[in-house]
Amino acid sequence: MPDTATTHVIHAPAHWRGVGVVSDLHLQSSDPETAHAWHRFLATVTPANGYDALFILGDYFELWVGDDALDATPDQSPETPFWQDCVQALATASDAVPIYMAMGNRDFLLGSRFFEATRVHALPDNTLLDWGAHRYLMVHGDAWCTSDTAYQDFRLTSRSSEWQNPFLARPLPERLALAAQMRAQSQAHQQAQATWFDVDETRITEETALLGATDVVHGHTHRPGTHDLLPSGTRWVLSDWDARAHPPRLEVLKLAADSGERVPL
């Protein structure tokens, strides 16, 4: 269960009228169509277009193996120019509105160098957006897939300094190869499951009550939907992004102090 003492609260300024929320973009150079769609959207994220802030709730990148990747040479990492472009796009957009980002299961190694370069605000776990009569709990959502015990064990281990420090000390090409290997193992694990691991709704209800949230916004499952949240709130599940899908999955949740709507792009 979450530690209420570490709850982070963002109080919406009085001038906010709308904020955009996205997750699971999984940006990668092998999918330029999705990256281009994202960059086009970022250019429109301004108060004049009804966006006073932007929240990115995890898995911005398909993978991230350390901030030093931003300085890598092409022979060390052919992905680096792509990552640099994504960082610059965020930095430009953050000049117009504040941008907040949570880390997901693919990019939990994002560090201070990345956030300094993008001028994006890192979202800690248990972040609440306090806005009008609503207190939105903004999370990636992977911690709620409690039935997937193998992943939860890995999640607990990989968030520790005992795991991260030795991993980040490895040469960058080795880290990239290990990340690709872990990704392949994860995909094989998912395909081998008889059922899809969705979030634990009982745990969500318990945690939101403990944290004093009225509503929840999360991603991770790639199962967009709008669900009731007891006693009288809403659980918004965000879509992943894939411009190559038919139809394309390119969607923003636009929140206001008293409402929310899904905006297809």
Image (cartoon, grey):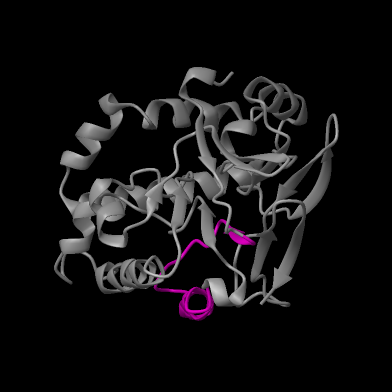
Q: In the displayed structure, does residue 222 sit left or right of residue 68?
A: right
How many dots with numbers?
A: 0
Q: Is residue 42 magenta?
A: yes
Give 222 or 49, whichever is nearer the viewer.
Answer: 49
Q: Is residue 203 visible?
A: yes
Q: Is residue 45 above or below residue 126?
A: below
Give 32 or 216, whichever is nearer the viewer.
Answer: 216
Q: In the displayed structure, does residue 32 sit left or right of residue 149?
A: left
Residue at image point 15% right, 49% down: 171
Residue at image point 69% right, 44% down: 132
Quarter of the figure with residue 167: top left
Q: Position of residue 159 (x, y in %)?
A: 38, 31
Q: Is residue 48 above or below residue 91?
A: below
Q: Position of residue 196 (x, y in %)?
A: 72, 42
Q: Give the magenta part as a residue range.
A: 17-45
Q: In the displayed structure, does residue 32 sit left or right of residue 4?
A: left
Q: Position of residue 32 (x, y in %)?
A: 46, 79
Q: Is residue 96 above or below residue 173?
A: below
User: Which quadrant is home to the N terminus?
Assistant: top right
Give 173 or 244, whichever is nearer the viewer.
Answer: 244
User: Which quadrant is home to the C terminus?
Assistant: bottom right
Q: Position of residue 213 (x, y in %)?
A: 68, 32
Q: Is residue 254 above or below residue 134?
A: below
Q: Is residue 113 magenta?
A: no
Q: Is residue 3 visible?
A: no
Question: Which residue reaches farthest front?
Answer: 14
Quarter of the figure with residue 197: top right
Residue at image point 59% right, 26% down: 149
Give 232 or 88, whichever is nearer the viewer.
Answer: 232
Residue at image point 30% right, 50% down: 65
